[in-house]
Image (spheres, rainbow, N blue to C red):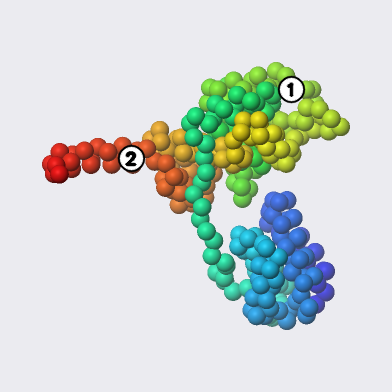
Amino acid sequence: MAIIDAVVNYRRWLKRRNCSRHTLRTYMNTLRHFVLWLALPIEEASFRTVQDFIDHLIAKGLTPKTINCYLDSIRGFYNYLINEEQVKIPNPVKRGYLLRLSRPLPRHLRDEEIPRLFAVIDSKRDRAIFMLMLRCGLRVEEVAQTTLQALDLPRSQLFVYQGKGRKGRVVYLSQDAQRALIDYLKSRSVSRAQSLFLVDKGRCKGTAISVRGIQKRMEHYAHLSGLHVCCHQLRHTMATQLLNADAALVSIQDLLGHSQIRTTQRYCRVSNLKVQRDYQQAIGKVIQRHTL
């Protein structure tokens, strides 16, 4: 089998399925790693071969989550060969075969930490960026991809066209987030770029700010404030605050763009003041009835 042709055709097939650039890049990189490691023709790989590859990845210090990404990529490639190229081989990556993952609880900022962080943000652009994460629950990739056309300030809405999994959604702007956006737009440099947030200095001035550029700004402000915080924690903070304000779990799911409600339910295990209030009210009645 001409492995190079098969991989090229697989990439074209993924593009026809409208996979994101990030997915394409990840699948191609992991598949390339597997092919270079493989010491036999790809159609001769067996379940034992895949187990040896997993041991190789573990020895390199990769996390179970990363290894599972490799397995997803390899399984998808063999499924393509079997179903699209009509190659008569078994899939060496068994269905459902993944490494067991730990499920750490989402980390969020405490109420007193939020003013500490925003007190050191002196850039109008950066304040608007992090306000969208804190008040609208946007992922860092979604912020970087937001365009001017996605803003609907009169209706206090923002359209997320390229969310995770290519799913779009509408989020709503709080008063402080909208105010931060307006302040930034007044100072935004003139540019042909349609991206909302632009690089404001250096050789790349006037071009769209990258995901890594946003993350580096957060690292800078985390250092200034003395907090251990990353961009995604602002999204977790927004979800936790809405839950504690008695927002419906389904509404939070829609705002965050979660496909499954169980993903959103993880926030209930972190900090659910409603459960705490219900418990205190109920246990108070129990104590009245059964005083020790």
The residue carrying mark 2 is 276
Q: How many numbered discs sit on the rendered protein? A: 2
Is any atom of residue 20 visible in this view?
Answer: yes
Give x and y (percent) for residue 203: 86, 32
Q: Amino acid at mark 2?
A: Gln
Residue that appears at 77% across and 31% down? 199
Q: Is residue 237 left or right of residue 87?
A: left
Extreme-right residue of the structure: 203
Give x and y (percent) for residue 139: 61, 41
The residue carrying mark 1 is 188
Is any atom of residue 69 visible in this view?
Answer: no
Residue that appears at 72% across and 19% down? 187
Q: Residues within 10 Å of mark 2 (few under 14, many from 20)?
A: few
Please tell me whether mark 2 sits on a helix, a strand or a loop.
helix
Cα–Cα gap, marks 1 and 2: 44 Å
Q: Is residue 141 left or right of residue 284?
A: right
Figure check: 166 above or below 184: below
**Could you say which quadrant of the image residue 97 lies in?**
bottom right
Q: Which quarter of the rendered picture does the C terminus lie within? A: top left
Which mark sits nearer the N-terminus, 1 or 2? Answer: 1
Residue that appears at 71% across and 65% down? 60
Please tell me whether mark 1 sits on a helix, a strand or a loop.
loop
Give x and y (percent) for residue 157: 56, 29
Q: Which quarter of the rendered picture does the N terminus lie within? A: bottom right
Q: Nearer the viewer, residue 258 or 176?
A: 176
Q: Mark 1 or mark 2, which is nearer to you?
A: 2
Give x and y (percent) for residue 72: 64, 64
